[in-house]
Image (tube, helix red, strand yellow):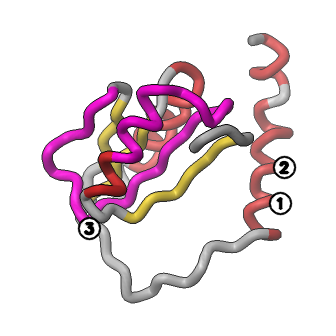
Amino acid sequence: MYAYIKKFTENITDTLTLVNQYPLKNHENRRFDNILICGLGGSGISGMIVSNWFNRSINIPISICQDYDIPGFVNQNTLVVSCSYSGNTEETISATLQCKDRGAFIVGVTSGGEL
């Protein structure tokens, strides 16, 4: 864990480089009512960090899901960020599939796997 923490700033720099290489499609007309971040363990911690980072500057709620089941508010106006390093975390996959069934806009953050 110490090695991961020590490389945190380097990982952020690498991530920003990758994001710029693979930009998301422009969805200017898309408006979200809320954000749900799905993930457990270290992946779930990243959701908490993002939530805390933006909680004073964003005008929509950010919720964290660390369970098989998602909150009742998830719908087509929800941005879902599903995080799983392996891409095979059972709870995250279950929650993501439920979000898909409700028509949410989903972004996956993973190194591979089913997700």
Measured Cα–Cα span from mark 3 to mark 2: 30 Å
Q: Which is more N-terminal, label 1 or label 3?
A: 1
Q: Is residue 83 magenta?
A: yes
Dot 1: what SS? helix
Badge 2 density bin: few <14, some 14–19, many ≥20, Cα 10 Å: few
Q: Position of residue 83 (x, y in %)?
A: 55, 39
Residue 59 makes an appearance in the image: no
Indicate left or right for 103 with 38 as reference.
Answer: left
Of 13 and 65, nearer the camera is 65
6 up-or-down from 85: above or below: above
Is 59 contained in the magenta span?
A: no
Distance CA(mark 3)–CA(mark 1): 29 Å
- Depth check, front residue: 80 or 63: 80
Which label sits in the foreground, 3 or 1?
A: 3
Q: Nearer the viewer, residue 49 or 93?
A: 93
Q: Which disc, if any, is residue 17?
A: 1
Asked if residue 108 is positioned above or below residue 79 in the image, the reply reads above
Residue 108: x and y, percent?
Answer: 56, 51
Q: Is residue 100 left or right of residue 41?
A: left
Q: Position of residue 49 (x, y in %)?
A: 50, 35
Amino acid type, residue under disc 1 in the picture:
Thr
- Start-end of magenta stretch: 68-97
Quadrant (top left, top right, bottom left, bottom right) of the C terminus: top right
Can residue 73 be seen here? yes
